[in-house]
Amino acid sequence: MLTAMPTAALPPSPQVAPAARGRGDACPGALRLHTADDGALARIRLPGGILTTGQAEALGHAARRLGDGDLHLTSRGNVQLRGLAAGCGGELAEALDAVGLLPSREHERVRNIVASPLSGLDGGGSRDVRPWLTALDAALCASDAARGLSGRFLFALDDGRGDVAGLGADVMVRATEDGGAWLTPGSVRVAPAEAPRAALMAAETFLEAARSHTARSWRVSDLPLREGELDRLVRDRLTTEGIEQNDRPEPVGSADGPPPGAVGGALSVHVPLGRLSALQWEALAVAADTELRLTPWRGVVVPTAGAIAARGVESLGRLRDAGLVTDPASSWLRVGACVGRPGCAKAHGDVRADAARALEATVRSALPLYWSGCERRCGHPRGAHVDVLATPDGGYRLSATTTDGSTRTASAAGPARMGAALAAITS
């Protein structure tokens, strides 16, 4: 569990000077708001998706008082508040700071950390990664260099089951069965006690490499380096910092996110299209003992201290009645969408509403669907899926990559024709 603490001045890290990012990305944060068609937008980073029930209550209150009343989950387990009134930034920052959601104002956009949401709850994985999470977040906030990271840079802490290992993080630490920690970039194993510091060293090494190139490098994949070069630089940095390492084979295996229902010592629900109403948010907070864990798959894990048999079943029923998905066979698990109209001026359609109208048609597809309002495809998932793209004429263009590597496409005039279009590209 992450404990609340007020914002305080933090000592700088002497190792690396921050990268010069006057041209930095426009990724929104809690202090840097983004103007959208439905008002200002704030993105609050929640490392590991974890927040206490008190923090959840404060976020819900802020959404009702300052925004559209809803809480919007992101593909990194963070929360967005939308429809914010102009000039409310100071009031929002004060509310977040009061409950420990702004441990460092200089680092609030770079605290992008996903972590295995069931870690320590269901007996799965090789290690409970929550101590890593707390330590890495503290190290990030104490690093002067880390302020130079883009708001898009992503850390992942995988407890060994492989769930967040496939999310394309820039820096990943994965627990191994033999008690070690696999680090990428670097492609080495380090002692588990050194894992958080090693992850920060990898990020700072990325920043050093980025400073030597004129092209923008917001993420590791942007770096114009030869294959294996960043791994070598990271290993050299670890050696300089006295972190022992070895090159035993990388762990393999992967897993999906938590299915809806009772899972180990927790309840798991899916949030249709990632949008939580105030009543749904309150129902989740009531069901929780001390904390909520938001997942990168737009779900919520509610630790219940093992009270599944009695209170857990009752709580699942209340969450289902509130409109949250508790059935692992639900079609909602196969559908995602960006915000679309009316919130985004670039969108060509109300993709969320159309995705809901076409929900029954998704059973005809062997692949999940992601609806995008424009060519930017904000929030689209990794891996195989049907790309449903809104077009200027009010229709949709669908595309899917087949098992032989070819791409099939089809058009649909609207959600009512989605079933036929899906059949054309997935049959």
Image: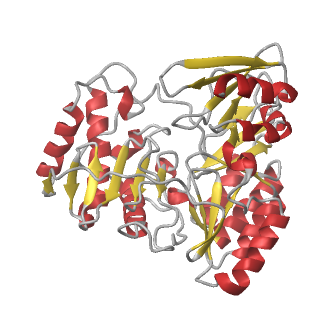
Q: Residue at x 74, y 32 (%)?
A: 36
Q: Residue at x 67, y 85 (%)?
A: 309
Q: Is residue 7 left or right of residue 65?
A: left
The one nearer the camera, 334 or 270, is: 334
* Quarter of the image with the C terminus in it: top right
Rendered image quadrant of residue 299: bottom right
Q: Residue furthest top?
A: 393
Q: Position of residue 412 (x, y in %)?
A: 79, 20
Q: Position of residue 91 (x, y in %)?
A: 72, 54
The one nearer the camera, 69 or 365, is: 365
The one nearer the camera, 367 or 154, is: 367
124 lies above or below 162: below
Q: How is the image coloured?
A: secondary structure
Q: Position of residue 256 (x, y in %)?
A: 52, 53
Rendered image quadrant of residue 308: bottom right
Instruction: Count numbered badges in the picture.
Output: 0
162 lies above or below 394: below
Q: Position of residue 407 (x, y in %)?
A: 56, 19
Residue 13 in view of the camera: no
